[in-house]
Image (cartoon, helix red, strand yellow):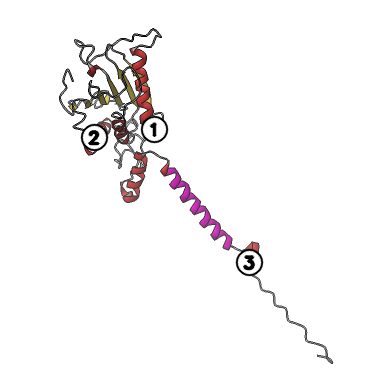
């Protein structure tokens, strides 16, 4: 140094990756995106019906049950963890044997659900459960002292709602389309507004549809509503019998082939009686 000149400070430049050129923000952003994805998955699951939620829960309990193609899966009639995917056979169509098994299991599950809910005894003679060539047929039959609808009205009574809700928990797991059929007795209306048993039987099927979809059945699963009025009575010799009034849920077969029309004997909660 010369004279009293102060020493110059030494400037050290360090090269790094800080600021907007750094990578720390990427880690935070990745954590945020992962958290949001998990949130959306949870929100999606909570918005699904009971059958889908149970299937997803079962998958996470035992992922090994997840199969593809024509291999069996955790849900009868499904190839994945979600309902609505048919079991495919060698020709690409739904496998008749697998569908038959799924319908038989659904019949047993519905019967068990009524038992667990304590409704079997109260509904003796009013619930017919059978697997037919058409599919799984569940018939809900009225009695004078145990109706399902208000007299002359499509308004659903409290006695019918839990039956339909338990049915939804079972059939929501199946991909099959559903038909609802309505039947009345032969009582005539005294008014002259044109409303008849044809309208009543159809309106009652629509009321049942609304209850089932409100209970978690995906919209679109019910694709037919049929009103038969009093034209197909259980007891033709007694057209005013209360048991002629009934609602039928038909979970229709999708499979085609020689095994698609396997018929099982009817299974009824109690023998029918021609009168209540």
Which numbered disc covers residue 214?
Answer: 1
- The disc, 3 or 2, on the residue closer to the chain's N-terminal end is 3
| Residue 166, image quadrant | top left
Question: Which quarter of the image is occupied by the C terminus?
Answer: top left
The segment highlighted magenta reads 23-44
Report the predominant secondary structure element of the magenta stretch. Answer: helix
Q: In the rendered picture of this protein, how many numbered marks are placed on residues?
A: 3
Q: Are marks 2 and 1 in contact (CB under 8 Å)?
A: no
Label 2, label 1: how far apart the Cα atoms are: 19 Å
Q: Residues within 10 Å of mark 1 (few under 14, many from 20)?
A: some
Residue drawn 47% across and 49% down?
Answer: 39
Q: Is residue 179 above or below residue 194?
A: below
| Residue 97, image quadrant | top left
Residue nearest the viewer, comparing 71 with 264: 264
Q: Position of residue 105 (x, y in %)?
A: 24, 35
Which residue carries the number 2 mark?
114
């Amino acid at each position: 140094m010369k004279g009293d000149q102060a020493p110059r400070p030494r400037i050290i430049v360090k090269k790094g990756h800080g600021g907007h050129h750094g990578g720390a923000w990427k880690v935070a952003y990745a954590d945020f995106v992962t958290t949001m994805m998990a949130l959306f998955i949870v929100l999606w699951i909570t918005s699904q019906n009971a059958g889908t939620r149970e299937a997803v829960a079962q998958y996470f309990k035992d992922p090994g049950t997840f199969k593809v193609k024509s291999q069996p899966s955790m849900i009868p009639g499904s190839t994945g963890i979600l309902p609505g995917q048919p079991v495919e056979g060698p020709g690409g169509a739904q496998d008749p044997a697998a569908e038959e098994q799924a319908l038989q299991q659904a019949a047993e599950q519905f019967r068990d659900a009524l038992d667990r809910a304590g409704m079997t005894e109260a509904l003796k003679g009013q619930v017919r459960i059978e697997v037919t060539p058409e599919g799984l047929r569940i018939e809900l039959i009225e009695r004078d002292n145990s109706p399902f609808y208000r007299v002359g009205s499509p308004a659903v009574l409290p006695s019918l709602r839990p039956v339909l809700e338990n049915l939804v928990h079972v059939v929501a797991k199946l991909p099959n389309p559903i038909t609802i059929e309505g039947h009345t007795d032969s009582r005539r209306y005294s008014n002259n507004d044109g409303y008849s048993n044809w309208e009543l039987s159809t309106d009652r099927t629509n009321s049942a549809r609304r209850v089932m979809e409100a209970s978690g059945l995906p919209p679109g699963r019910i694709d037919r509503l049929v009103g038969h009025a009093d034209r197909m009575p259980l007891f033709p010799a007694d057209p005013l019998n209360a048991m002629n009034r009934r609602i039928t849920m038909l979970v229709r077969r999708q499979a085609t082939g020689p095994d698609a029309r396997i018929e099982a004997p009817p299974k009824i909660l109690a023998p029918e009686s021609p009168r209540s």
